[in-house]
Image (cartoon, grey):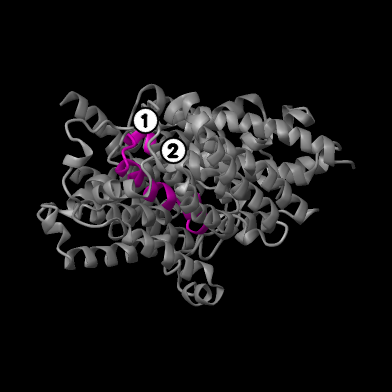
Amino acid sequence: MLIKGVALIFMLISFPFISYGAMREISWLWWSGLIALAIGGLIPAASRFFESSG
Amino acid sequence: MQNQLPIGLFHWIVALLPILVLLFLLVFLRWKGPQAGPVSMFTAWAVALLFFRTPFETLAVASAKGVWDAIFILYVIWPALLLYKIADRAGAFEALRIGIRRFSRNRLFLVLAFGWIFVSFLQGIAGFGVPIAVAAPLLVAIGVRPLYAVAIALIGHSWANMFGTLAVGWLATIKVVELQNVTGTAFQTAILLWIPNLLAGFTIAWLFGRMNGIRHAWPLVLIISLIHGGGQLALVLWNPVVSTFIPATVALGALYPLSRWERYSEPQDIESEIMQERKGKKETEEKEPVMGLWMSVLPYVVLAVSIVIGSGIPQVESILGQFEIGLPFPETTTGYGLTTEAIRPYSPFSLFTHPGTYLLLASLIGWTVYRAKGYYRKAGREKEGIWSGLIGNAIPASIAVTSFLVLSKTMDDSGQTNVLALGISAVSPPLVYAFFANWIGIVGAFITSSNTASNILFSPLHDTVAQTEQVLSQTTLIAAQSTGGAIGNAIAPANIILGTSTTQQTGKLGEILKMTLPWAAVAAVLTGIVTVLINNVTFVR
């Protein structure tokens, strides 16, 4: 559950990063948000394979 | 700049890909929502980047809007789960199950009362998934198998989505489209919404006991549907804002005299596969519940009363509604010229009139009263953690909902959703389009889990089609779209997760879809047929 909790936090924190970065044209900031969202999405999808192999 | 979205077969198919991937993973491979959701989200990203000329910044902004939309729903899921845990640990559901027998011992009556009439009442005033999150565990408490409980709540509440939540869907629709006949549109919408309402009552009776269930329940279903559907039809002519809330409340009140009717007060002799058998104990041998019936529903009474006061009284709502939160986003565009305007703040939500706040209030009062009365100790579950159980259910549900909403906004802002709808309108002869107008609404609600969002997305499309096709009525197409948006709520993944999370059925999204999809398909076909009839009978250009 801890790993899923981390995934959710990654997904949720992307929102203020992207909003602030896109509004002020700070590209590294909105990129950070997008990457955080991608990591947050990858973790539960990947965990399916870890769970089945373990 | 005018957009030049590619309306060809190839782009239509790739635009459909994220939805197909989601359905395939959930229904055929039986993946869980938190795993299938992100994969579908990545599919929508890939389609946007590779085939819809979407810049990364547009993708980022669309995704962040999706996250914000998800937070709106998570603020229902988490408090609803908290309320469930607080009541469950105190023994309230067990007390409800035993206590309700004194009210009526007719199981079919109780299933319809909770799964159709009570959810419709909640949808009339609260919406945003609250009816499913609240009613599904109550159905389980009276003995319905959890998967059926979720499916029944989904089917039972869907008709009330359009004019429910004090008609937020209707108010949004008249904002995005200049209606040629406002009253006529509301009236035709109410006619079409009667179809999923009546179908819901009979479907729930059929699920309970097949034809025996229908034979037993038909007077009840007709009476309640007359109140729901007929009441709504009459009230939209006066004030659409209360056209679901008032009939749904009257129907709830009608339960008492109906429960005095011998037909529905005494047990019926119908085999039902949806009910859990409680073997080993006779009714008389069951443990005495820790609390009475009314105490068991106290948090839900607090919830209903606070929502009625907070959202139903305009003066109170205007004061509470002043505190809004939301963040801004800049204008974005795609390589096909699809522009999404800058917005500040994006979709702000009012903290004190949000259903999540009412759920928290109900949880707080419920926990305080139950603790003061010593129910946690009496139920022998004092040491079971409320928070640990809550987190275990809420986190997977939250991941799934967030990825669904990111998928939805990505498809929306990159033009995939538009291409899907425009593709249908481009190849359909006018009357075929009329038949499929409600299907477009269903797709919108499936993607966004919202009747309102579906109408905002697709009502302008129907308006454009009505202007170009001589034989199609704008009034009828918008009515069909609105009804489809309501029906689609029965199959929307984010809605299903609200039910699975409060009934401890996390990961069973695909199994619920298998039950609600056929119902939605039948409702859509019937709605399509009536749409064509209404269009042909009423419309003369």
Q: Is residue B336 visible?
A: no
Image quadrant assignment for residue B275: top left
Write down the residue under mark 1. B274
Label at residue B81: none
Q: Give the x, y percent position of residue B69.
A: 45, 53
Residue at (47% x, 30% y) in the render: B213
Q: Which region shows up in magenta?
A: B120-149
Give x and y (percent) for residue B358. Answer: 39, 64
Query: Marks 1 and 2: which is nearer the front?
Result: 1
Q: Along the line of sight, which residue is nearer the eye, B331 or B537?
A: B537
Residue shown at 77%/33% (left/top)? B533
**Mark 1 element type:** loop
Residue in front for this viewpoint, B330 or B464? B464
Mark 2 secondary-structure assignment: helix
Q: Farthest residue to the top: give it.
A: B28
User: What residue does disc 2 label?
Assistant: B152
* The quarter of the displayed image where residue B442 is located: top right
Q: Is residue B23 left or right of residue B524?
A: left
Label 1, label 2: how many angstroms apart (C-alpha)? Answer: 10 Å
Any part of residue B5 in sight:
yes
* Image marks 1 and 2: residues in contact by CB distance under 8 Å: yes
Mark positioned earlier in the residue sequence (1 or 2): 2
Magenta stretch: residue B138 in it?
yes
Residue at the farthest right position: B541
Chain for disc number 2: B
- Magenta span: predominant SS is helix
Q: Amino acid at mark 2?
A: Ile
The local crowd at label 1, few if under 14, some if 14 to 19, many if 20 or more residues have their Cα within 10 Å, is some
